[in-house]
């Protein structure tokens, strides 16, 4: 696996540390075993690196005559969506690579996950009153999950009557949530005193937007269009806060193996 633009290293615990200019991702050490006489026997496995690519594993105590299992496991995994199409922004959701977007997953210091994306569904799971119904064609959806991934803390639609999509999300130390992306709606919800209360782009184009949701998801603290007469989009990771998963001082995002 290659991590474009990243520096790779292995720490003292055997974890893979992926460092970019914006944030750090930590992949837990690989777990490997062989079945010997009906028993699982652990095989020590270490990441093998070449530049910004994980090229394989080095093995200690490996019997080449027996099958080997390198077995990452999910700590939690769940579907999230309604009856139609629901998606995050693409393959670069965590690392900000692939589609031209920032991360659409953020994790706070308590391990709670915040997911942003776009939904065509009229029955996307909603918790709370911030955005209880779909407003248009493609709506922004934003959801907060508990640290074990077993429950939704809050979940909402955000958007106007046309196409809206979130392209990046961040969370600060007070659990306020920041979204940015693009909207084609002329009635995107803006707040009093917004920097730009009306769209700047023609109806055939789209504007960028910026939104802040309070920690309890009871209100938009602020929401504004950002754009001129042509298409504008915002997908840059947020530099607003040291708790943002997109800043250089953010806590590492950890993926855990079995």
Image: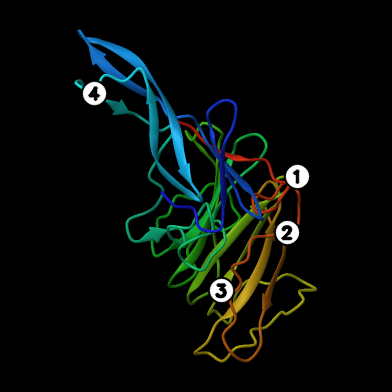
The residue mark sitting in front, 3 or 4, is 4
C-alpha gap between disc 3 and disc 1: 25 Å
- Give the residue displayed 54% in from the left and 79% down from the top: 185
User: Residue beneath label 1, please?
Assistant: 174
Mark 4, other Cα within 10 Å: few <14 / some 14–19 / many ≥20? few
Q: Which mark is residue 239?
A: 2
First of labels 3, 1 by sequence position: 1
Q: Is residue 242 left or right of residue 164?
A: right
User: Residue beneath label 4, please?
Assistant: 64
Q: Secondary structure at mark 1?
A: loop
The image shows residue 67, relative to residue 107, as above or below, that is above
Relative depth, front residue between 164 and 50: 50
First of labels 3, 4 by sequence position: 4
First of labels 2, 1 by sequence position: 1
First of labels 1, 4 by sequence position: 4
The residue mark sitting in front, 1 or 4, is 4
C-alpha gap between disc 2 and disc 1: 15 Å
């Amino acid at each position: 696996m290659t991590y474009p633009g990243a520096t790779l290293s292995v720490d003292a615990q055997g974890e893979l540390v992926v460092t970019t200019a914006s944030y750090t991702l930590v992949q837990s050490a690989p777990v490997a075993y062989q079945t010997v006489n009906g028993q699982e026997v652990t095989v020590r496995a270490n990441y093998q690196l070449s530049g910004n690519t994980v090229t394989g594993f080095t093995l200690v105590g490996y019997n080449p005559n027996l099958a080997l299992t390198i077995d990452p496991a999910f700590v939690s995994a769940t579907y999230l969506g309604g009856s139609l199409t629901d998606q995050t922004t693409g393959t670069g959701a965590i690392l900000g690579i692939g589609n031209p977007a920032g991360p659409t997953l953020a994790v706070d210091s308590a391990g709670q996950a915040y997911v942003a994306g776009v939904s065509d569904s009229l029955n996307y799971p909603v918790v709370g009153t911030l955005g209880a119904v779909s407003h248009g064609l493609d709506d922004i959806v934003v959801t907060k999950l508990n640290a074990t991934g077993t429950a939704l803390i809050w979940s909402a639609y955000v958007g106007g009557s046309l196409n809206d999509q979130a392209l990046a999300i961040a969370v600060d130390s007070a659990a306020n949530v920041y979204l940015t992306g693009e909207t084609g709606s002329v009635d995107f919800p803006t707040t009093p005193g917004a920097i730009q209360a009306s769209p700047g782009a023609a109806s055939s184009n789209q504007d960028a937007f910026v939104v802040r949701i309070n920690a309890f998801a009871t209100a938009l603290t602020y929401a504004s269009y950002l754009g001129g007469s042509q298409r504008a989009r915002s997908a840059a990771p947020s530099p607003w806060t040291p708790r943002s998963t997109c800043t250089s001082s953010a806590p590492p995002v950890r993926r855990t193996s079995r």
